[in-house]
Each structure stands twice: as structure tokens, then as C-alpha cells.
């Protein structure tokens, strides 16, 4: 089994792999001069295959102190660096910019086929259960919806907060060991 770098485990638990994958094939109905031979009568395959990306909106609480925004932005940068299949943006509940709604609007300009909203929160609470769903247009308790992108509706999914996870427990032991090493 191939081992993962330590940084992989530090942030792996904050995002999900979307079950939506889409290959887009460019087709032409009529054979034009200079085109490829038809493989199926009436449909011409041009050989163009595109893998669409998923949008990930990483949501932070926001704070008057810079640490929260820095943490969310640094986590987003790590996801971008290690997962090219995601277009990652940050959004904040309050006090920091961009807001969740501003980031949702920015995704309308991106070539994505699904949008997942991932709260960078440890546990469920009012923000997770009510505030964030309201900001992304989902009723309370609903985890799936749609997002209109260039006149087309794409899937919108809302992920769980970090929660209790063995990776989080390992991270806490790592932080405890680091603190104890200063004795």
C-alpha cells in the first residue's frame, strides 16, 4: 500500500469526492468535408473529450481576527494543489470576504458540472443546520439541490462538517505531541 504524505491526512477529511463524473463528447450530426468518417449513422465523433471539473465552495465562519480567513484560504490552496479536478473557492458566513453568496456568484463563470459546498466547521450547529443552507438556497435538512450555471441546472450538494473522524483524532495527537515536545 502506497503511503500518503502527512499533509494529505491533515486536510483529507474536509472534502468529499463527488459521485458525479461527466465526459462530454463533441459530436456533429452531418459529415462535413474534411471531417472524420462516421462511426454511427447520423452522428460524427470529432475526437474532443473534456473532463469537467467539480466546484468546491469551502465555507469558513469568518472573524475579525485574520486567523480564520488564513486557515480557510490555506486549506483551499492545499486542495487546489493536490486535486486538479476541483475548482476551489472560499466563502465566509460573516466578517470576511468573499461572502458565501459572492462566491456562489463567482462559480457561475466556471466550467463545472457539479458544486459541493463544504463547511470547514468541526461540528453541527446553527450555522451548519440553518444559516449556510439558507445562503446556498437549500431548505433546512436538505443536502441536495441545483445550481443554475449559464442557464443550465447542475447538481448542488451540501457536505457534512468535519465531525468525529480518526484523521481528526490523529491530528489532535500530533498537535499534543508537538506541544509536549516543548517541555
Image (cartoon, grey):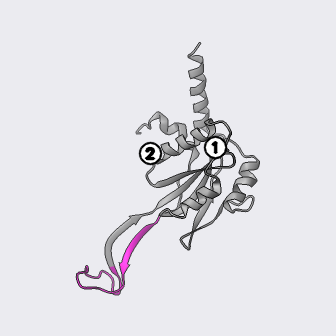
Where residue 63 appears, as percent x and y from the top left, is 68, 40
Q: Nearer the viewer, residue 162 or 73?
A: 73
Q: Nearer the viewer, residue 2 or 182?
A: 182
From the viewer's perspective, is residue 170 above or below residue 128? above
Q: Residue at x 35, y 87 (%)?
A: 42
Q: Nearer the viewer, residue 58 or 22?
A: 58
Q: For numbered disc 2, what is the local secondary structure?
A: helix
Q: Quadrant of the C terminus?
A: top right
Q: Quadrant of the N terminus?
A: top left
Which residue was labeled with disc 2?
A: 81
Mark 2 neighbour class, 10 Å CA radius: few under 14, some 14 to 19, many 20 or more: few
Mark 1 neighbour class, 10 Å CA radius: few under 14, some 14 to 19, many 20 or more: many
Left or right of 92 in this view: 29: left
Alpha carbons under labels 2 and 1: distance apart = 20 Å
Left or right of 67 in this view: 82: left
Main SS, magenta residues: loop
Where residue 155 appears, as percent x and y from the top left, is 58, 65
Q: Which residue is the extreme one toward the left?
A: 34
Q: Which residues are magenta?
A: 22-44
Q: Residue at x 28, y 85 (%)?
A: 32
Q: For numbered disc 1, what is the local secondary structure?
A: loop
Q: Is residue 153 magenta?
A: no
Q: Is residue 37 magenta?
A: yes
Which residue was labeled with disc 1?
A: 162
Q: Residue at x 61, y 30 (%)?
A: 172
Left or right of 141 in this view: 175: left
Q: State if disc 1 and disc 2 touch (CB < 8 Å).
A: no
Q: Residue 45 has which mark?
A: none
Q: Earlier in the sequence, mark 2 or mark 1?
A: 2
The answer to which image quadrant residue 176 occupies is top right
Amino acid at each position: 500500500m502506497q503511503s500518503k504524505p502527512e499533509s494529505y491526512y491533515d486536510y483529507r477529511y474536509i472534502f468529499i469526492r463527488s459521485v458525479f463524473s461527466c465526459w462530454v463528447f463533441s459530436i456533429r450530426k452531418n459529415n462535413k468535408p474534411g471531417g472524420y468518417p462516421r462511426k454511427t449513422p447520423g452522428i460524427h465523433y470529432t475526437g474532443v473529450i473534456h473532463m469537467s471539473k467539480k466546484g468546491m465552495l469551502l465555507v469558513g465562519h469568518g472573524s475579525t481576527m485574520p486567523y480564520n480567513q488564513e486557515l480557510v484560504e490555506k486549506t483551499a490552496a492545499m486542495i487546489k494543489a493536490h486535486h486538479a479536478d476541483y475548482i476551489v473557492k472560499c466563502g465566509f458566513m460573516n466578517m470576511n470576504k468573499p461572502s458565501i453568496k459572492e462566491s456562489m456568484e463567482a462559480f457561475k463563470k466556471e466550467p463545472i458540472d457539479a458544486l459541493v459546498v463544504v463547511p470547514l466547521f468541526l461540528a453541527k450547529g446553527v450555522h451548519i443546520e440553518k444559516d449556510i443552507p439558507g445562503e446556498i438556497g437549500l431548505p433546512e435538512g436538505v443536502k441536495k439541490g441545483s445550481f443554475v450555471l449559464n442557464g443550465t441546472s447542475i447538481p448542488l450538494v451540501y457536505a457534512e462538517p468535519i465531525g468525529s473522524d480518526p484523521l481528526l483524532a490523529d491530528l489532535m495527537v500530533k498537535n499534543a505531541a508537538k506541544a509536549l515536545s516543548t517541555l
